[in-house]
Image (cartoon, rainbow, N blue to C red):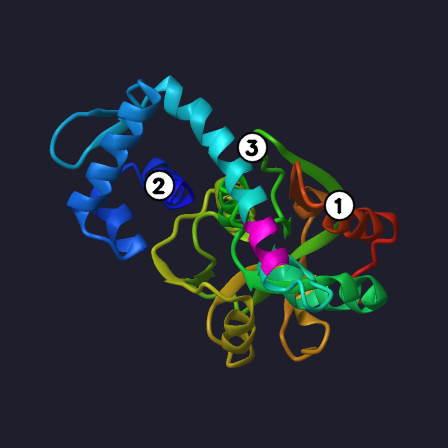
């Protein structure tokens, strides 16, 4: 089926590797290679330059075809979903991602405020860091998300929501509890260290704000973290930081969303909630 071939092309384009694409698609590597070769012959264009057995580079034709492929696959999945649920009123699948801070202290209250609008949507929510959210939006794996960094990509709309104040929490020890590279807090932490001529000699990378908070409660290390994360933990000492460490939360969505999701995004943007 042509749509299966398009899925293969999309995965190869995103991974830049036949073997990795084959593993993600649960296919053999020769099958993936043959499908891409047949697609190239059918289109009469070269989609990938082969620079060795595994390394491939998308051509300009592949860049253009990738955009068209995403649109075709989006329409196909929407139509397929409606066909499979035609006997009952089908809800529109809506894939949302939130950064760790927005997921814990912003998104639940926001969705609760607009629960009536959820009736038409089949919501799926995941937690990712800001860079991952933007990447998956550009790959049409998400519909919209909430991030903590001013990131964007082609065909992605970014709208400011509200601000959040970071603080330096925990004990003044050599151990730093550090979020992973790509997260919003990591970006600000690197700026703080540079600004204060500090070096990271003792680091614990923790990919969860909730875990960082619990480590701070145990008196282990120090970390830059949202002041909202400490509201329920007055026992954790912290030091206020300047407005330079007041960050902006954003709603990011890809263009061309189904109308019910577009309407839902517009509703969210019309009445954003403060973090409580």
User: Of marks 2 and 3, which one's residue comes earlier in the chain?
Assistant: 2
Q: Where does the magenta region start and end?
A: 77-83
* Label 3 neighbour load within 10 Å: few <14, some 14-19, many 20+: few
- Please name the residue that numbered disc 2 is placed on: 5
User: Circle 1 — which element?
Assistant: helix
Q: Distance between the Cα atoms at labels 2 and 3?
A: 26 Å
Q: Residue furthest front?
A: 87
Identify whether 234 is placed above or below 168. below
Q: Distance between the Cα atoms at labels 2 and 1?
A: 27 Å
Q: Is residue 176 left or right of residue 227?
A: left
Tell me if label 2 and label 3 are in contact, CB under 8 Å.
Answer: no
User: Circle 3 — which element?
Assistant: loop
Magenta span main SS = helix
Q: Is 78 a magenta residue?
A: yes
Question: Quick one: 167 or 141, which is closer to the camera?
Answer: 141
- Please name the residue that numbered disc 1 is placed on: 259
What is the quadrant of the C terminus in the image? bottom right
Question: Quick one: 218 or 142, which is closer to the camera?
Answer: 142
**In x, y percent, where is residue 93?**
63, 58
């Amino acid at each position: 089926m042509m749509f299966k071939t398009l899925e293969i092309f999309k995965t190869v384009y995103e991974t830049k590797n036949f073997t990795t694409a084959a593993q993600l698609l649960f296919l053999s590597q020769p099958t993936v290679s043959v499908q891409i070769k047949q697609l190239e012959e059918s289109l009469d264009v070269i989609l990938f330059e082969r620079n060795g057995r595994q390394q491939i580079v998308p051509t300009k034709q592949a860049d253009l075809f990738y955009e068209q492929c995403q649109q075709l696959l989006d329409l196909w999945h929407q139509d397929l979903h409606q066909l499979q649920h035609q006997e009952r009123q089908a809800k529109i699948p809506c894939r949302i991602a939130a950064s760790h801070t927005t997921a814990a202290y912003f998104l639940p209250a926001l969705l609760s405020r607009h629960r009536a609008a959820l009736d038409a949507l089949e919501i799926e929510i995941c937690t990712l860091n800001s860079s991952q959210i933007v990447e998956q939006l550009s790959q049409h794996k998400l519909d919209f998300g909430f991030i903590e960094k001013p990131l964007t990509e082609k065909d992605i709309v970014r709208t400011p929501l509200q601000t959040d104040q970071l603080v330096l929490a925990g004990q003044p020890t050599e151990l730093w509890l550090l979020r992973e590279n790509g997260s919003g807090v990591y970006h600000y932490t690197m700026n703080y260290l540079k600004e204060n001529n500090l070096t990271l000699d003792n680091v614990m990378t923790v990919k969860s704000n909730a875990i960082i908070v619990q480590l701070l409660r145990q008196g282990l290390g120090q970390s830059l973290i949202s002041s909202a994360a400490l509201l329920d933990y007055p026992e954790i000492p912290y030091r206020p930081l300047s407005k330079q460490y007041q960050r902006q939360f954003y709603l990011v969505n890809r263009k061309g969303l189904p109308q019910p999701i577009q309407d839902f995004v517009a509703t969210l943007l019309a009445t954003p909630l403060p973090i409580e």
